[in-house]
Structures are given as C-alpha cells and as structure tokens.
Image (tube, rainbow, N blue to C red):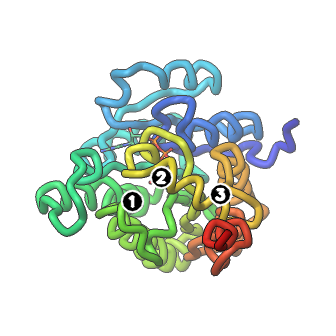
Amino acid sequence: MSNNLLKGKKGIIFGALNSSSIAWKVAELAHAEGAEFVLSNAPIALRMGEINELANKTNSEVIAADATSNADLEILFDKTLAKFGKIDFILHSIGMSMNVRKGIPYTENNHEFYLKDMDISAVSFHKVMKVAYQKDAMNDWGSILALTYIAAQRVFPDYNDMADAKSLLESIARNFGYHFGTRNRVRVNTISQSPTATTAGSGVKGFDSFISYAEDMSPLGNASAQDCANYCVVMLSDLTKYVTMQNLFHDGGFSFTGCSHKVMKKFENG
Ligand SMILES: NC(=O)c1ccc[n+]([C@@H]2O[C@H](COP(=O)([O-])OP(=O)(O)OC[C@H]3O[C@@H](n4cnc5c(N)ncnc54)[C@H](O)[C@@H]3O)[C@@H](O)[C@H]2O)c1
C-alpha cells in the first residue's frame, strides 16, 4: 500500500547490486511511494546486469559512476540535473573493503587497500556531496542519507578496516550536514543498520555467528533490509525535515542493550 510519501520527489540511489541489496529495497519502496530517481553503481557492478531488472520495475535510468571518481560523479550529476532539474534526495549505500575481501586481519592491514577502502566506503560520500554542493543540485529541504554500522562506535574485531571507514563516514555526514543545512536546509544523516545478509555484509568473517549474536542481543531482533528501506523512505520524506547530522540506529535496540537474557542463558552452568 502506498502513502505517496515521496510523491514528486527526485533523487539518486547509489548501491543497488542485486535483490538482496539494501539500496534495491529502498528503490522499490521509493518508487511505490511516488519517487523518480536515477540508479547508479560502479561500472563493474553494472556489468552483472541485474540492475536492469530494477530499472525496468521502477521506470528509472541507470547511470554508471565509480563513486570514488570525481569525473564520473560530475557526469552523473550533470545527466541527472538535465533530466530532473534539482533533486530532493540522495542515498549512499556503498561499501567495500579489500582487506575484508582478502581476509587480511586488522593488525596486518595492507595500507594501499586501507586507503582504497576509505575512499570507496567513506570519502566517496564526501565526493558525492561536494559535487552536489558545487552544482547546487539539491532542492531546499532535501535529504541525503548514507548507511553505516555500529562498529563505528564499538569494537567488532572482524569488521576490520570497515569500522574506521564507518567512523569517517558518520563524521562526514555531521560536517557536511552543517554546511548543507545552513545553505540549503538540506539534511544529512546516517542510518546504522543491523547486520543484514547482503553481498557486502556476508563478506565479513564469521558473519553467520555475528548475525545470530546480534539477533539474540536485540530486544526486537535484527532489522531486515526491507525494514531498513522503510526507515530510509521516512528519512527521505518530508516527515523528518528537522532531523539532521544524526547517526540513527536501526537495529532492534542492539545499540543500547548491555546484555540480553538470551545471551546470558548461553553462559549459565548446568
Ligand atoms: N549488510 C550489512 O550487514 C550492513 C549493515 C550495516 C550497514 N551496511 C551498509 O549498507 C550499505 C549497502 O550495503 P549492502 O549490505 O546493501 O551490500 P551490497 O553489496 O548489496 O551493496 C554495496 C554496494 O556498494 C557498491 N560499490 C562498491 N564499490 C563502489 C564504487 N567504487 N562506486 C560505486 N559503488 C560501489 C557495490 O557495487 C554494491 O552495490 C553499505 O554502506 C554497507 O556497509 C550493511
């Protein structure tokens, strides 16, 4: 059922790789709620072709952009502005770690990979917003969102260098949020999502036990990708106009739970 929460709104959605992707679910729901948008992903991800199914379903155009490339982002924004005029929302749903992919532990991180990981998973958010800011691409009261994880605040040893990337990402949201707010009344936030079975999520070492632990620790259980999309759409809508520079936990209560009965039970004797 649609409530037309995004009726008339235009935007760019980064990061829909396949039907498990959080960005994919956001695109489906944003379309159902009346939004029009461009779908963007790295050229290599587009080669897999699955995004065309989403584009057909949501009646949207796909424009390739490596989010670490200023040149690609310039072209993406120029094409989007030519199509829609100024836009109302941007979703940054991008993450990748070479150190995670290669199974290199945090203490042994390869620093070439480390810098690449920061560039893809965090600095790209600054690059996207810088281009949007310079081109004055956002309508007043627009909304910019990125996805993050609680390893930015607390140690999850196998989250590896992605933890550092998420800390930086959240800091970029706060700082750009100030500048975008004062100039355009545009808000910038991050949503800190439960562990979710997607291509990026499943790459983390021990992901299955990670996801089960979070499930048992969270009073409401883990939030699904679909529920994350619901929250994203609310954050892109006019119902949240004064929420900015926040890191918003969407994790079933995990972030504020010290210990749960389910987890304690596993340590009881006899
Ligand atoms: N899955 C989880 O457990 C979880 C939890 C919290 C936060 N997140 C975050 O959610 C976001 C989306 O991830 P997901 O879980 O949907 O996984 P996903 O693998 O479906 O999405 C990650 C996307 O990043 C894109 N990407 C990688 N390098 C890129 C580049 N250079 N330029 C442009 N795009 C690039 C990939 O092509 C892919 O579409 C990420 O920021 C991730 O860290 C995921």
Classify mark 1: helix, strand or loop: helix
Identity of the amino acid at label 2?
A: His
The CA distance from mark 2 to mark 3 is 25 Å
Checking the image for residue 256, the label placed there is none
Q: Label 1, on which residue?
A: 125
Badge 3: residue crowd in 10 Å (few <14, some 14–19, many ≥20): many
Rate crowding at label 1 as few (under 14), some (14 to 19) or many (20 or more) other CA atoms within 10 Å.
Answer: many
28 or 133: which is nearer to us? Answer: 28
Quarter in which the N terminus is drawn: top right
Residue indicated by mark 3: 215
The amino acid type, in three-letter code, at marker 1 is Phe
Query: Residue visible at 62% across and 24% down?
Result: 59
Residue 241 seen in the figure: yes
Do the CB atoms of the residues marked 1 and 2 lie less than 8 Å apart? Answer: yes
Q: Residue at x 43, y 37 (%)?
A: 40
2 or 3: mark nearer the eye? 3
Q: In which quadrant of the rendered image does the C terminus lie? A: bottom right
Q: Distance between the residues labelled 1 and 2?
A: 7 Å
Of 133 and 41, the residue lying toward us: 41
Closer to us: 40 or 213: 213
Q: Is mark 2 within 8 Å of ligand 1?
A: yes
> Looking at the image, is mark 2 or mark 3 earlier in the sequence?
2
Label 2: state its secondary structure.
Answer: strand
Q: Can residue 135 be seen in this view?
A: no
Q: What residue type is labelled 3?
A: Glu
What x and y, as percent, mark residue 150? 51, 69
